[in-house]
Image (tube, rainbow, N blue to C red):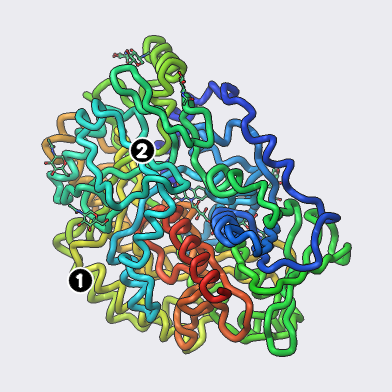
Amino acid sequence: MMFRPFRVWAATVAAVLSLSSVASCYPQLQAEFSKRQIGCRNLKDSYDYIVIGGGQSGLVVANRLSEDPDATVLIVEYGYFDDRPMVLQPQSATSYPRQDLFNVTSVPQKGLGGSRQAVYAACVVGGGSTINGMMLNRGAADDYDNWEKLNNPGWGFNDLLPYFVKSTRFDAPAPQLQKEFNITWNESSYGSDGPIHVSYAPFQWPGVKIQYQGLVEAGAEPQLDGADGHAYGVFWYTVRTVHPILVAGQELTNQQSAVDNATVTRSYARNQYYDPVANRENLQILTGWRVNDITFDENKHATGIRMQKRGTEAGAQVITVKSKKEIVLTAGALHSPQVLQRSGIGPAALLEKAKIDVVVDLPGVGSNLQDHAVSGFSYRYTTDVEPNPTTTQAQNKTFAEWVQKEWKENRSGPMSQTTGNTAGLLPLKVVSPDRWEEIVAAYRAQNAADFLPGTYTAEQVRGYEAQRAILSDSMTRTDNAVVELPIQGTGSGALVLTKEVSRGTVLLDPADIYADPVLDYQTFVNPVDAAIAVENVRFARRLQQTPSVRALGPVEQVPGANVTSDEALLAVVRSSSGSSTAHISGTCAMMPREYGGVVDSELRVYGVGGLSVADSSIQPLIPGAHICATVYAVAEKAADLIKARHR
Ligand SMILES: Cc1cc2nc3c(=O)[nH]c(=O)nc-3n(C[C@H](O)[C@H](O)[C@H](O)COP(=O)(O)OP(=O)(O)OC[C@H]3O[C@@H](n4cnc5c(N)ncnc54)[C@H](O)[C@@H]3O)c2cc1C
Ligand SMILES: *[C@@H]1O[C@H](CO)[C@@H](O)[C@H](O)[C@H]1NC(C)=O
Ligand SMILES: *[C@@H]1O[C@H](CO)[C@@H](O)[C@H](O)[C@H]1NC(C)=O
Ligand SMILES: *[C@@H]1O[C@H](CO)[C@@H](O)[C@H](O)[C@H]1NC(C)=O
Ligand SMILES: *[C@@H]1O[C@H](CO)[C@@H](O)[C@H](O)[C@H]1NC(C)=O
Ligand SMILES: *[C@@H]1O[C@H](CO)[C@@H](O)[C@H](O)[C@H]1NC(C)=O
Ligand SMILES: *[C@@H]1O[C@H](CO)[C@@H](O)[C@H](O)[C@H]1NC(C)=O
Ligand SMILES: CC(=O)N[C@H]1CO[C@H](CO)[C@@H](O)[C@@H]1O
């Protein structure tokens, strides 16, 4: 998650962040594992499988493919291992270390007053899972059923649910906390022995109860759980930290946890999918190398990869490694399309401009970019409950001492929090009872091409029209949401647009095909997105006026009580929203080829053999959730599909 809508809100986040001072209490657990990586001299000439990108999905796929001791697997990752203990801490959820990120900024966004926007793409073993906000929620069943409706058989919610289950292991909250906050869940939608621990933070701000109730009063339907397909209304969701379960002072710890049971730590692809299998003889990882491109034989069957050491110049030594069965591309939504484009698979006009021989003219490679744009609001609560996230340690000694003590004694308190555990996910009818019909009708009446990138071909426009039919239907439903409103016990909040209808692009730079690609979010280029964002702000106002929240004495600061007209709200939304919640996806979309798709429903790249994509770039429509849980499930399913076809 990445929320940075308004300065006031950012200040609140900074206040929460300032709690992160105990940085060095974790033992050096991980260092030994990184020794098992290979140098380029230990490379074999060929492997059964080559996984391009050892990020979140790459490690899942490599783990599952190497379960067969006879199958050799090589992972090539541009980043390095990050063995710093701090990446395990709950507070790392909001720190986003520069050293583990690509340094990329978008082109100026015309829908956002011309501002350049941040691009979040990880560059480290474990990828996004190593540095992300640790929110672990899933979209509504309707979101995945929509994938299936785009002619992707086998990708509805019921098909994916076993993989959501397989990837997780549920840690129940302490009974006391469960009761106090009425944390409810549906146990059957989680695994009991999967790699990724899911849990609720052991501490919740008391204000959360009030805001949860306010959302109910404002029309949100309370759900038992969102993870079982009911991701609409208001509910509790998990994060993926391991934490000790305290029952009357007794610790019921998880014996198999990869980390010290007394700690509260990040559970992610590196420590749960890679470290436990790092000593498999048939699995190797090479870090600090960039895959340049994929090679093909005369039948357009992928034969191997060409790669060079990170930081070396163009023309430096290039090493070729051959694949015997399949190459799996998991370089993330920013780089998977770039690797394909460099390999001659992409829009022919772009490839010709970059002087790359066209292997397959596949216009959709790098299109269909989606993220969750984020707007926000800010209120000062004049009669807030204590403690609350705006209570500062610097100004309040009692609070500061308690925070430190809770963390040291119990691994609990504010320092155990990542990004919160509950949110409203609101259908358009709840957000805008008066205008939802008008907005949906306007969307359906548009000439789709008017709001799509100029590079879109006729087939891509057709594919988008198919998406629009599906999305506009979801907007009329009460079991799917257009906005996520996280509840964090403070008067400032984010409004995350979960059903973006604008579409962006990621295209390699023809002047330097090895430089980071050119990313254009096209945020709010379609006025329907901006119109929904305005209605979201109005909903946030109604939320403050519910009996429960009104008791906190809210005083509006952003956008300001005098900002009421459509025009004024639109201006605020366009000048202050962000393009990204760090959820770039969709750039190698799983859709029919005649819709501008890049991979088929078995994740095989169109027009070639022996090559598939298995990361966040395959999502044809972004689900209404932080996408990490979906990335795990998709990668688990991808591994099964790949194993099955080589059996
Ligand atoms: C800062 C941040 C915060 C986030 N917060 C949340 C959150 O709270 N909750 C949530 O659900 N989701 C969150 N996300 C999103 C989620 O973590 C990502 O969507 C997910 O990890 C992406 O997985 P992936 O496998 O598609 O790509 P990645 O995990 O990004 O993996 C791609 C890997 O490929 C490597 N690579 C790229 N090009 C090459 C090349 N040419 N050769 C070799 N290697 C290459 C990269 O270095 C990278 O390690 C966040 C993401 C970020 C970046
Ligand atoms: C991005 O910049 C940081 C800080 O300058 C650096 O440490 C990191 O290596 C850079 N990332 C990449 C992928 O080059
Ligand atoms: C719990 O989730 C399962 C799927 O995991 C679903 O079949 C069931 O209906 C859910 N229960 C409730 C009460 O919603
Ligand atoms: C607890 O939450 C459940 C599910 O949202 C709801 O049905 C129930 O009424 C709640 N109970 C209390 C005491 O608030
Ligand atoms: C300081 O923090 C304590 C503990 O959270 C709280 O009870 C008290 O009201 C706070 N005092 C002030 C002045 O905010
Ligand atoms: C830690 O937890 C125990 C058991 O619940 C409790 O008695 C103690 O007060 C807690 N410590 C702090 C600092 O709150
Ligand atoms: C609202 O009031 C603020 C502060 O007085 C002012 O700067 C702003 O221009 C006003 N906005 C509108 C739309 O009236
Ligand atoms: C299984 C295990 O290692 N349990 C330990 C967990 O941590 C506590 C201290 O916090 C120990 O007392 C347990 O033995």
Residue type at mark 1 is Glu
Task: Please name whichever residue, 567 or 599, is drawn nearer the observer in this view of the structure.
Answer: 599
Task: Say above or below: 109 vs 559.
Answer: below
Residue 609 figure quarter: bottom right
Left or right for 614, reference 490? right
Task: Give residue 438's mark.
Answer: 1
Relative to 193, is 19 above or below? Answer: above
Q: Position of residue 529 (x, y in %)?
A: 35, 64
Residue 231: x %, y % from top left: 27, 55
Q: Residue at x 35, y 55 (%)?
A: 138
From the viewer's perspective, tell me whether residue 350 is left or right of residue 16: right
Give me the residue at 61% from left, 67% from top: 329
Q: Name the residue under label 2.
A: 171
**Which residue is nearer to you in this view: 250 or 621?**
250
Mark yes or no: residue 558 visible: no
Q: Which residue is drawn at 43% across and 48% down?
A: 194
Q: Is mark 1 within 8 Å of ligand 7?
A: no
- Camera-nearest label, 2 or 1: 2
Earlier residue among tags 2 and 1: 2
Residue 250 makes an appearance in the image: yes
Depth check: give the residue in front, 614 or 435: 614
Question: Dividing the image into 4 quarters, which one contains the C terminus?
Answer: bottom right
